[in-house]
Amino acid sequence: MSRNPRAAHAAAVSRAASPFRLNLEQQSKRAKELLKGMRAGDGEAVARFRLHHPQASGLRDAVLPEPLTQLSEAQLVVARELGLPSWPKLKAHIEAMDRSWRRIVRGDAAPDRDMATLHIRCGEDIASTLQEAGFVGDFLEYSDPLCQGPVLDEPEWLTRRASFLAKNYGAGTGQSYEQIAAKLFLAEERLRSAASRYERIVLWFEHDTYDQLILARCLAQFAETPAPRLELISPARYPGGMRFIGLGQLPPEALRLLWAERTLVSEEALQAGRSVWEMLRSSDPRPLAELSRAGTPALPQLGRAVQRHCQELPWRGNGLSLTEQLILQLLAEHPRTVAEMYSRLMMEREPLPWLTDLMILFMVERMKRVTEPVFTGAFEGEERRWPKERLTITPLGRAVLTGSVDWLSLRPPARWLGGVFVPGSSPCWRWSHAAASVVNR
């Protein structure tokens, strides 16, 4: 990645609005408005207070007690809504973001200038933002969604991946099998040679399944070919006015702040990644489920992501994966377009948001291919693009959701989850949520 002074200058000229660019004056105004609502007994204000104030969990009255209706308490609620523990922490964060921005505007020295550096990310979403932030290292996009489709322990596993991606996502991305395969093999080649070409390798991966399974692949490689210096940036959250889903949401000054918090990857973390990579490709999901229960202390987010991955197996109660359950739950509330469902899923319902829009389309289309429909789809007007399709749950869909009918009795398409083949019928490996384990039934 080469330094682009013009890009940095353009970013400096127009500091665009972002939910992750917070303004202290604006937040102070929000706190005063919240205080006014709290004192007036406004239902929304009181609900916000109860949701976010640490002393409000036991309150039941519509009117808050006088000691809690102070500006400092409203400021605390606002800070916690934005993902910070206190108002002073919010002020400090805003000041740090402003200082980081000024460094970009001034054209301060590149943060990664001291070593030949490779930044690895599971997508291209931060490539240009890193440039705007002043980074000068090279960039490697390793973006194979290992959380879906076959990931097998065999020499031709990448070819199988390319076939899966081309069949299911090729039309949506406008890429042929040859283009997808070439990209996968090039990324794998660059990953394998990285340790011999760079003094420092920095892994940029957040907390979800998509990211963490690719992180496991990278760590397995560096356990085999150690890098001179291997560092990790892996946030689970970031202060802002909307839910943090991924690094691609963040402005350049945030990436500079995260750079200052990067950590060295320990030997224990390398071995955890190697173990997950080996287990992911196994046809037996029991070791992976056991690891998800035990956790990965050296990389806590990896263990949580592994458990979320296991939850994409059919569940014991109704045969649905967790994502399929969440889809039907949203439709059970009322009909929604695919775009509306995807937004609600990612911003509210999904515990570890990991799906792209094409991935949710893939899952919706798979759910249509059953012996009897669990939802129907229709378009309003002449626009026929898939995000506008309105889905309505059927009585059968409600029965599947409650477990009265087993999803696998409807013969959904067979699929792969890593090394585990999931047939469209029983018996198969299922996730037992109560025991956080898998059973074959």
Image (tube, helix red, strand yellow):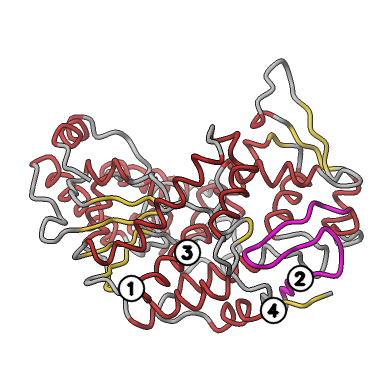
Residue 70: in magenta span: no
Q: Nearer the viewer, mark 4 or mark 1?
A: 1
State the mark number for residue 327: none
The percent coordinates of residue 410 (x first, y second) are 89, 53
Q: Does label 4 or label 3 sit earlier along the sequence?
A: 3
Q: Does label 3 or label 1 sit earlier along the sequence?
A: 3
Q: Does label 2 or label 1 sit earlier along the sequence?
A: 1
Q: Are marks 2 and 4 in contact (CB under 8 Å)?
A: no
State the mark number for residue 430: 2
Q: Which residues are magenta?
A: 411-433
* Residue topped by disc 3: 212
Q: CA distance from mark 2 to mark 4?
A: 9 Å
Is residue 32 in view? no
Q: CA distance from mark 4 to mark 1?
A: 33 Å
* Residue topped by disc 4: 437
Horizontally, is 210 left or right of 432 in the view? left
